[in-house]
Image (spheres, rainbow, N blue to C red):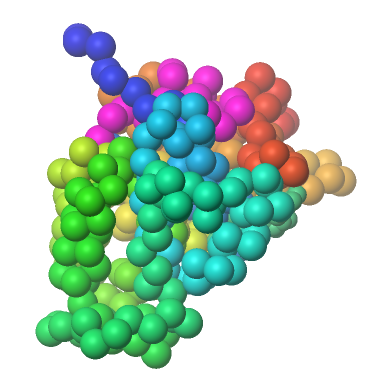
């Protein structure tokens, strides 16, 4: 087997669980409940790409607007406006509070108060990846993009379209989705079958303590650590203790 090129996330402990990083060009889904650190993980992945490798990153935000995100990420010492000025970071802000001026198109999709199509989002992503030369993408979260499609067949084709588009770019993607049913025996969601890799973030009660835990459920072309490992969110971002066990 030829050697797989990997994109290190630069997140402490995560690359160890991934045999070095995410296979280049793949689309990885991070599944987790609210407050588990999905947005932080996305931003940290892009920041590390810029700081450690000089790789430009594109952040597609669907829930929180740009200003809000920048403010939160500043507390980790990440100077996102500085990266933007250096043309290393760009946002596509399709959050409900952001106004998209007259660009809505056919086959409408409603996100918050806005109408725009999935084709429009996909076209924007392609154009931005090209103009920025993005090597890393974050889509956070895809929930509002796909939740709209109740019909399973339609939803499947929309997610596949998105995954295909993202992996046809020169970049490697982390996208997120809300975990609907938590616990060790949760339901696997459609998105998880369609993504190339799945990482699950949860909080579990272990004895009397509540612990944040991470598990790699799948990653194509990768001999993964499938054990459940503890992680913390600190002032430096996400830190995974890849040598510690939870149980
Ligand atoms: N500076 C910080 N130090 C420690 N924990 C933090 C800090 N900032 C945010 N957090 C934690 O990060 C969580 C939010 O992370 P976020 O990535 O927004 O979650 P998600 O996107 O999964 O909803 C909060 O629950 C909070 O506990
Ligand atoms: Mg979030």
Q: Quadrant of residue 71?
A: bottom right
Left or right of 8 on screen, residue 16: right
Residue at left 21%, top 77%?
117
Question: In the picture, which quadrant includes the C terminus?
Answer: top right
Residue at left 46%, top 42%?
46
Left or right of 169 on screen, residue 86: right
* Nearer to the camera, 206 or 221: 221
Left or right of 220 on screen, residue 89: right
Residue at left 59%, top 49%?
79
Q: Quadrant of residue 101?
A: bottom left
Task: Point out the stretch of residues depicted in magenta.
Answer: 10-25
* Nearer to the camera, 220 or 22: 22
Residue 67 percent coordinates (x, y):
55, 69
Tell me if residue 187 comes above or below residue 236 in the rendering.
Answer: below
Does residue 161 belong to the magenta stretch? Answer: no
Tell me if residue 48 comes above or below residue 15 in the rendering.
Answer: below
**Residue 165 appears anywhere in the view:** yes
Residue at left 38%, top 83%?
99
Q: Quadrant of ligand 2?
A: bottom right
Query: Which secondary structure type mostly characterizes the magenta part of the structure?
Result: loop
Residue 135 percent coordinates (x, y):
31, 38
* Nearer to the camera, 40 or 53: 53
Left or right of 247 on screen, residue 96: left
Question: In the picture, which quadrant includes the N terminus?
Answer: top left
Does residue 24 belong to the magenta stretch? Answer: yes
Residue 211 percent coordinates (x, y):
74, 44
């Amino acid at each position: 087997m030829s050697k797989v090129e990997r994109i290190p996330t630069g997140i402490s402990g995560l690359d160890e669980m991934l045999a070095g990083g995410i296979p280049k060009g793949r689309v990885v889904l991070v599944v987790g409940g609210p407050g588990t650190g999905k947005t932080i993980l996305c931003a940290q992945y892009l920041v590390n790409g810029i700081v450690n490798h000089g790789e430009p990153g594109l952040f597609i935000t669907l829930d929180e607007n740009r200003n809000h995100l920048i403010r939160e990420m500043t507390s980790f010492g990440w100077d996102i406006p500085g990266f933007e000025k250096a043309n290393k970071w760009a946002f596509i802000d399709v959050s409900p509070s952001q106004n998209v001026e007259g660009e809505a198109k056919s086959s409408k999709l409603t996100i918050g108060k806005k109408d725009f199509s999935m084709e429009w989002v996909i076209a924007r992503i392609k154009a931005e990846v090209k103009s920025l030369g993005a090597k890393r993408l974050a889509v956070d979260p895809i929930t509002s993009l796909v939740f709209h499609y109740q019909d399973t067949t339609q939803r499947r084709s929309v997610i596949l379209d998105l995954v295909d588009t993202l992996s046809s770019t020169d970049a490697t993607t982390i996208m997120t989705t809300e975990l609907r049913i938590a616990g060790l025996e949760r339901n696997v969601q459609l998105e998880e079958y369609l993504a190339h890799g799945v990482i699950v973030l949860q909080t579990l009660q272990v004895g009397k303590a509540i612990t944040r835990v991470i598990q790699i459920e799948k990653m194509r072309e990768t001999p993964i650590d499938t054990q459940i490992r503890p992680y913390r969110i600190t002032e430096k971002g996400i830190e995974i203790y890849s040598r510690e066990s939870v149980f």
